[in-house]
Image (cartoon, rainbow, N blue to C red):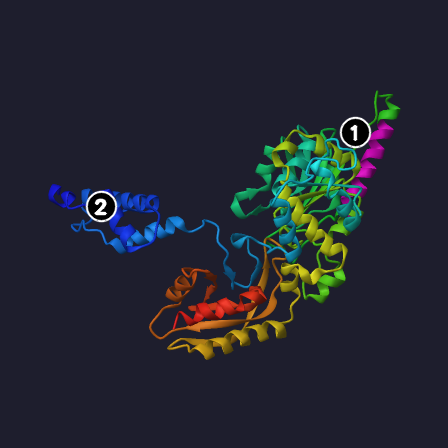
Amino acid sequence: MQALLARLPAVHLLADQVIAAAAVPRWAALQAARSEIAARRAAVLAGETTEPDIEVAEVIRAARALLTPPLRPVINATGVVLHTNLGRAPLAAAARRAVDEIAAGYSNLEYDLATGARGSRHDHLRALLRQLTGAEDALVVNNNAAATVLGLAALAAGKSVIVSRGELVEIGGSFRLPEILALSGCKMVEVGTTNKTRAEDYARAITADTALLLKVHRSNFAIIGFTAEATAEELVQLARAQHLASAAQAAALAAPGPAAALGVMVDLGSGALLSAEQQRAAGLPVEPTVAETVASGADLVTISGDKLLGGPQAGILLGTSAAIARARKHPLMRVVRPDKLTLAALAATLTCYRDARLDEIPALSMLRRSAAEVRAAAEAVLTACVAVGGGELTLELLPSQATVGGGAMPTAQLPSFAVVVRHPHKSAETLEAALRSQPRPIIGRLEAGRLWLDLRTVLPDELPALAQGLAKLA
């Protein structure tokens, strides 16, 4: 064993070989050399190998990997529009320009240009969000989970929150609603059953300790069949009736102070700013819109910025002035406040809604594309591949089913078209890995032993790169 270990090269000598063979910085060559030598030494000591020699090419690959940016742009050919693992919604050009402009220098993030005094970052989007949703007030945080935690903590910490058993969701990353309620300092009270929960179930559970009635969008699953659920409007009516009854009881008993109001909070998750008509026109199942939910009278409504809205990662709280004021003053607000780049991108995205420029928002454009438009894009890719020669590669145009993703509209199937890739000597898994390893990684989906590249989620300016990537597989 000692003889094998003695054959391992010195770090600096191996690094010198790497530098001579490839244009990499010395630090990268040294780090890669140390890593490869350590791995080979461990393998020898474990008896896993009797070959201590190290290929310089392996070290070069490791050194180059160190130079690759950790966050890279990819081509999404999965057919999942709001793909969480791929960063969800691509930003509109206007949002990208806004981010670049604000990132390049200083800004009035917390500075009042009119008075020269300190301002608040929370004021920049209030008017725009109120205009688009009809809310009395609005607040932006860094994601919807933060919005949920903040809302619960501000309105119901130390008190009971009533929620339907059918809405105790878990979404990606082990985000479980019961744990979020506990983190917020609330006491969860479950009512109803998995498939049926009515307003009267909430009513029977209300006590003097109840602070909030909570309704939660189910996100990435649906309950169909023999079902029933209380609407936001019904919960608001129940809360108001309960408050009136409590006030009357307090007056009869001559209790000091006003009766505590019972609040209603709705976590809409994705949160569609599209109207019901616009959802139907896009072939999507109609879900309650943000404006409709706000109009129900709920104290707080929370939505995501990077799902159906099509903007940056953000959480948006909409609701009454009193509820938003409590959230804004809560100590957690400092923890979850958004940065200037999020605010810039979100403002530009919301402006697209205000000015009816929905086609400029990539996620909405993808959702609204017709199957014929997707087919035309797929045919363009096939034509480009034929022009450069496909070798033994077989490319076939087939109908596909795309999805919304991002925990939004889980039952929606979007008619689409895909380029299905096959090779006589390479498996679908090998082809998929080869596309992932390209300078501009291409992410497809494996289905029925074949590699599918769904064109609904490929941006128009990515079509040439997709064709070039396929040509390299030949």
Q: Residue at x 84, y 21 (%)?
A: 255
Tell me the crowding category of disc 1: few under 14, some 14 to 19, or many 20 or more residues within 10 angstroms, Cα based.
few
- Where residue 387 is drawn, which disc sits there? none
Q: Is residue 343 visible?
A: yes
Most foreground residue, 441 or 296? 441
The residue pinned by badge 1 equals 260
Q: Position of residue 344 (x, y in %)?
A: 66, 46
Tell me the crowding category of disc 2: few under 14, some 14 to 19, or many 20 or more residues within 10 angstroms, Cα based.
few
Q: Is residue 324 above or below residue 234?
A: above
The residue pinned by badge 2 equals 13
Front disc: 1 or 2: 2
Magenta region, residue range = 233-249
Q: Position of residue 44 (x, y in %)?
A: 19, 45
Q: Position of residue 189 (x, y in %)?
A: 65, 36
Q: Position of residue 299 (x, y in %)?
A: 76, 40
Q: Is residue 89 above or below residue 253?
A: below
Image position of 460 (left or right of 227): left
Q: Is residue 223 above or below residue 280?
A: above
Most foreground residue, 362 or 332? 362
Task: Specify the amino acid type for callout 2.
Answer: Leu
Task: Specify the amino acid type for callout 1.
Answer: Ala
Instruction: Give whichever of discs 1 and 2 has the lower sequence position.
Output: 2
